[in-house]
Image (cartoon, rainbow, N blue to C red):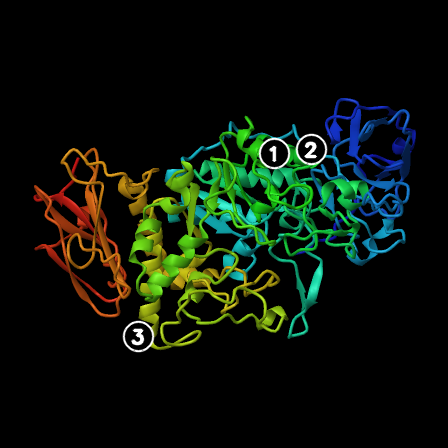
C-alpha cells in the first residue's frame, strides 16, 4: 500500500514560522519534544560541522518555509546539535540537512549537505513526495524527500489500559502481517490493510483462542521501493517490511490518515482494542540493518548524520559496509550511541505505545562487536534483558543472522526466548514419515532440553513453530515437494531449498478426495503436535484455514493475492479452523502439556511418573530403531488434572497401541486426527470411552486420550 494524497494542512503559518524565536534548547531527549512554548529539537551528529533544521508549513511543500542554521557554539553540546523553536505545535513538518568535512582520515563519514534527512527519533513521517532514486547521488533532493512530524504524545485516552503480562507458558502466538491480514477484498473490513482493519478482525482472533499477535514489522519502511519487475511485468516491491528507515514511527501506509499526524493514535487504538480482548501485541523489530543499504544506497537519515557510528564498516576500507544481514549493511548495535538509540526505542514502544514484547529479526547480528566478531557479553543484549522498563515484556530472538552466526540454545542472556529452528525441522520430517526420529521428537515435545537445558534455561525459552512468514504456509507444506517462486522474478533461485515438505502424492492443488483428506489429516497432525509440546507455540496467520501462497516459500515481494489472507478460505475450511481452535482450547485446559519446566522424573500424588515414553508396546519407545515412525507417551495429571496419553503414528498403516492401566480411571478419546469434522476433537464432557487397553490408531494420525473417572465426569 502507498499513502493516499490528501489536501495539505497548514499547522503553523509561514509568517509564524518566520517570526518564531530560536534559542539554544537542550541536548536531551533526542528527537522533537513538544512543550508548553514550542518544540525542542536534538540530533546526534558527532562529526558534523554544520546542521540545518528545515521547517515546512505543509507536509508536501517543495521547499522549507524556514531554514534554521544551528550555530556550533550555541547549539552544540558534544555529540548533539539542538535548538528550541517557539510557537510550534503538534503536526509541524520538519527535516534536517547535515554537512561535514571530507573524510581524509578514513573515519567512514558520508555527509552530504544537499540531502534532506529524517530525524531518527521521529514519531511520524510523511512520504507523499518521496523518490528513492533522488536520495542517491550528490544532487539536492528536497522536492522529493520524506519529512518528519512533531507529535503530541500526551493527548490520548488509554482508558486504563495495562500490559496483560500473560505468562510465556500460557502464551499462544499468532504471527501476522498487518496489511496482509485484511488487504484482500474477501476480508470485508472498512479499512483494508491498516491498523484499523486489524481491529475489525479481533472477534475472529478471540474466538480462535490465541493470546498474542506477533506483527511483522510496523516501523516505517519504504513500501515504494521497486526491487525488480516480475514475470508478468508488474513491479515487485518491499512487502514484508524488513527494511526500516524510521524506528520510532508506525508505518505510514498502515494508517487510514497517513498525512494527518494520527499515526500514533491509530496504532494505539489497535493495541488498546487487542488488550481489551485479552490479546497481547508483540512487534517483530529489525535492528540489524536499515533501508539505506550499501555504499550505493540512498541517504535517508543515519548515513548522513553519523555513518561511521551506526554501521559496521570494513576496517581496511571504511567506505564499504560489512553485511551480516544480506541487506547491504549491518547496524553497529553495540556502539554506546547506537545501543542508547535501540534501548530508548524499545522503551518508547512499551511506555508510550503499550506493546507487550518484541521479536528481534536476525538477532545474532546484535551480538557482534565493532569489527563484526561475536561478543561473549554483548552490551546491548544484556541492557535489553536488564532494563527495568522492559522487565515485564517478552523478548524473543531469531537466534541467527545472515553472516553465519547461529545461536539457538546459546543466545546471550537468560530471559531471551528463541525461535526453535530444530523443532520446526524435526517435526516436519517426522510428520512427513522420515524414520528414526522418535528420540529427537521426544526431546522437542519435552521442550528441547538438549538446546536450552544446558545453560539453565527452560522450555519457555523455546518458541515452537512449524511455519512462519519465511517459508511455506502449512497448507503448502503438505501440498508441494518443491518451492514455486517464479513470481518473485529470481528464476526460482530464492527461498529455502530444503523445506522437509511432502505433497501427499500430488504437486499443488488437487481435486482428488484421497489426496485432500490426507492433506487435512497432516495439517491436523502438525497442529496437534505443536499444541502438545512444551514451550511457546506460534502459528502463522491463515494456517488455521489452509491459506496458500501457491507454493511460494519467499513471498517477501508479493503485495497481492499470493500473500493476502483469503477469508473465503476461512469459511470453506471450517473443519481445519475448528480443529485449531479446539487444540488451542485443549492446551489451555490441560496444564500437563504446557508446564514451564523440563520433565524431571517427579511423580504425582498417585505415584505416577510425570512422563512415560512408549511405542506400540508400553515402555518400548524404540529410541535406537532407525525405522521407527511411531511414538506414544503418558503425561501424569497433577492436583486432580486428568492424565493424558498421546499416540503419534506417522506410519502409513494403522497400528494397535497398548494403553497403560490407570487406577480408578478409564481412557476416553479426546482427539483423533483421522476422524472427520465434529469427531476429530471432542470436549471433555463428550469424550468417547475406550473400552479396553488397546487403541487402533490409523496411519498418519495423532490421538489424545484422557484418563477420567470410571463413572465419567471431572477428575477434580
Q: Mark 1 or mark 2: which comes first in sequence?
A: 2
Contact between labelled residues 2 and 3, with CB atoms less than 8 Å apart: no
The residue under label 1 is 379
Dot 2 lies on which element? Answer: helix
- Among all residues in the image, which is located at the extreme front? 316
Horizontal and vertical percent for residue 591?
28, 39
Which quadrant is home to the N terminus? bottom right
Horizontal and vertical percent for residue 252?
67, 47
Which quadrant is home to the C terminus? top left
| Residue shown at the point (55%, 56%) measured from the top left | 180
Dot 3 lies on which element? Answer: helix
Q: Point out which mark residue 336 bears.
A: 2
The residue under label 3 is 514
- Among all residues in the image, which is located at the extreme top? 36
In this picture, residue 100 sits left or right of residue 273: right
Foreground residue among 508 and 680: 508
Foreground residue among 610 and 704: 610
Give the spatial CA distance, label 3 vs label 1: 55 Å
Q: Can residue 448 be seen in this view?
A: no
Please, is residue 361 above or below residue 133 in the view? above
Disc 3 crowd rating (10 Å Cα; few below 14, some 14-19, many 20+) is few
Give the spatial CA distance, label 3 vs label 2: 60 Å
Horizontal and vertical percent for residue 702?
26, 58
Foreground residue among 506 and 303: 303
Q: Mark 3 or mark 2: which comes first in sequence?
A: 2
| Residue shown at the point (81%, 45%) measured from the top left | 108
| Residue shown at the point (90%, 29%) measured from the top left | 72
Horizontal and vertical percent for residue 211?
42, 42
Contact between labelled residues 2 and 1, with CB atoms less than 8 Å apart: yes
In this picture, residue 693 sits left or right of residue 705: left
Q: Mark 3 or mark 1: which comes first in sequence?
A: 1
Amino acid at each position: 500500500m502507498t499513502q493516499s494524497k490528501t489536501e495539505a494542512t497548514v499547522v503553523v503559518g509561514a509568517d509564524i514560522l518566520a517570526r518564531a524565536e530560536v534559542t539554544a534548547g537542550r541536548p536531551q531527549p533526542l528527537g522533537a519534544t513538544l512543550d508548553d512554548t514550542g518544540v525542542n529539537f536534538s540530533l546526534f551528529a558527532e562529526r558534523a560541522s554544520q546542521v540545518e533544521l528545515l521547517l515546512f508549513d505543509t507536509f508536501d511543500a517543495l521547499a522549507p518555509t524556514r531554514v534554521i542554521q544551528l550555530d556550533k557554539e550555541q547549539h552544540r553540546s558534544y555529540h548533539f546539535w539542538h535548538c528550541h523553536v517557539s510557537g510550534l505545535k503538534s503536526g509541524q513538518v520538519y527535516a534536517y540537512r547535515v554537512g561535514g568535512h571530507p573524510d581524509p582520515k578514513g573515519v567512514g563519514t558520508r555527509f552530504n549537505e544537499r540531502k534532506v534527512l529524517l530525524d531518527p527519533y521521529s514519531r511520524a513521517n510523511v512520504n507523499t513526495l518521496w523518490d528513492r532514486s533522488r536520495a542517491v547521488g550528490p544532487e539536492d533532493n528536497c522536492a522529493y524527500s520524506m519529512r518528519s512530524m512533531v507529535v503530541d504524545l500526551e493527548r490520548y485516552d488509554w482508558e486504563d489500559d495495562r500490559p496483560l503480562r500473560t505468562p510465556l507458558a500460557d502464551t499462544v502466538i499468532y504471527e501476522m502481517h498487518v496489511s496482509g491480514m485484511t488487504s484482500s477484498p474477501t476480508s470485508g473490513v472498512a479499512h483494508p490493510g491498516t491498523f484499523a482493519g486489524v481491529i475489525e478482525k479481533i472477534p475472529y482472533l478471540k474466538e480462535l483462542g490465541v493470546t498474542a499477535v506477533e506483527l511483522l514489522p510496523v516501523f516505517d519502511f519504504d513500501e515504494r521501493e521497486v526491487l525488480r519487475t516480475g514475470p508478468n511485468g508488474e513491479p515487485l516491491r518491499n512487502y514484508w517490511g524488513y527494511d526500516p528507515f524510521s524506528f520510532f514511527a508506525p508505518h505510514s501506509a498502515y494508517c487510514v490518515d497517513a498525512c494527518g499526524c494520527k499515526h500514533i493514535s491509530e496504532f494505539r487504538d489497535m493495541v488498546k482494542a487487542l488488550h481489551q480482548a485479552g490479546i497481547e501485541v508483540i512487534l517483530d523489530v529489525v535492528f540489524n540493518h536499515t533501508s539505506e543499504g550499501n555504499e550505493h544506497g540512498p541517504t535517508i537519515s543515519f548515513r548522513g548524520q553519523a555513518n561511521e557510528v551506526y554501521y559496521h564498516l570494513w576496517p581496511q576500507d571504511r567506505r564499504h559496509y560489512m553485511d551480516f544481514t544480506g541487506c547491504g549493511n549491518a547496524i553497529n548495535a553495540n556502539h554506546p550511541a547506537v545501543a542508547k538509540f535501540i534501548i530508548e526505542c524499545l522503551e518508547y514502544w512499551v511506555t508510550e505505545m503499550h506493546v507487550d514484547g518484541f521479536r528481534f529479526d536476525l538477532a545474532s547480528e546484535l551480538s557482534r562487536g565493532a569489527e563484526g566478531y561475536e561478543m561473549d557479553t554483548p552490551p546491548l543484549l544484556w541492557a535489553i534483558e536488564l532494563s527495568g522498563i522492559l522487565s515485564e515484556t517478552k523478548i524473543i530472538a531469531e537466534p541467527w543472522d545472515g553472516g553465519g552466526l547461529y545461536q539457538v540454545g546459546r543466545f546471550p542472556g537468560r530471559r531471551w526466548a528463541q525461535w526453535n529452528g530444530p523443532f520446526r525441522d524435526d517435526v516436519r520430517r517426522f510428520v512427513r514419515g522420515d524414520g528414526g526420529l522418535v528420540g529427537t521428537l521426544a526431546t522437542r515435545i519435552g521442550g528441547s532440553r538438549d538446546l536450552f537445558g544446558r545453560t539453565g534455561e527452560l522450555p519457555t525459552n523455546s518458541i515452537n513453530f512449524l511455519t512462519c512468514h519465511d517459508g511455506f504456509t502449512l497448507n503448502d507444506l503438505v501440498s508441494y515437494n518443491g518451492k514455486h517462486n517464479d513470481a518473485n522474478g529470481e528464476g526460482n533461485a530464492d527461498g529455502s531449498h530444503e523445506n522437509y515438505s511432502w505433497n501427499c502424492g500430488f504437486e499443488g492443488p488437487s481435486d482428488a478426495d484421497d489426496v485432500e483428506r490426507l492433506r487435512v489429516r497432516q495439517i491436523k497432525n502438525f497442529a496437534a503436535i505443536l499444541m502438545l509440546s512444551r514451550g511457546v507455540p506460534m502459528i502463522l496467520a491463515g494456517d488455521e484455514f489452509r491459506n496458500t501462497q501457491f507454493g511460494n516459500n519467499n513471498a517477501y515481494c508479493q503485495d497481492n493475492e499470493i500473500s493476502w489472507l483469503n477469508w473465503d478460505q476461512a469459511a470453506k475450511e471450517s473443519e481445519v479452523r475448528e480443529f485449531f481452535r479446539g487444540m488451542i482450547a485443549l492446551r489451555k485446559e490441560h496444564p500437563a502439556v504446557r508446564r514451564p519446566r523440563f520433565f524431571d522424573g517427579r511423580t504425582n500424588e498417585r505415584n505416577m511418573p510425570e512422563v512415560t515414553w512408549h511405542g506400540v508396546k508400553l515402555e518400548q519407545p524404540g529410541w535406537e530403531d532407525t525405522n521407527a515412525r511411531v511414538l506414544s507417551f503418558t503425561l501424569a495429571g497433577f492436583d486432580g488434572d486428568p492424565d493424558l496419553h498421546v499416540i503419534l503414528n506417522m506410519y502409513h498403516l494403522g497400528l494397535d497401541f497398548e494403553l497403560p492401566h490407570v487406577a480408578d480411571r478409564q481412557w476416553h478419546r479426546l482427539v483423533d486426527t483421522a476422524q472427520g469434522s465434529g469427531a476429530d476433537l471432542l470436549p471433555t464432557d463428550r469424550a468417547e470411552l475406550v473400552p479396553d487397553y488397546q487403541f487402533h490408531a490409523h496411519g498418519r494420525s495423532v490421538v489424545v486420550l484422557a484418563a477420567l473417572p470410571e463413572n465419567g465426569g471431572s477428575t477434580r
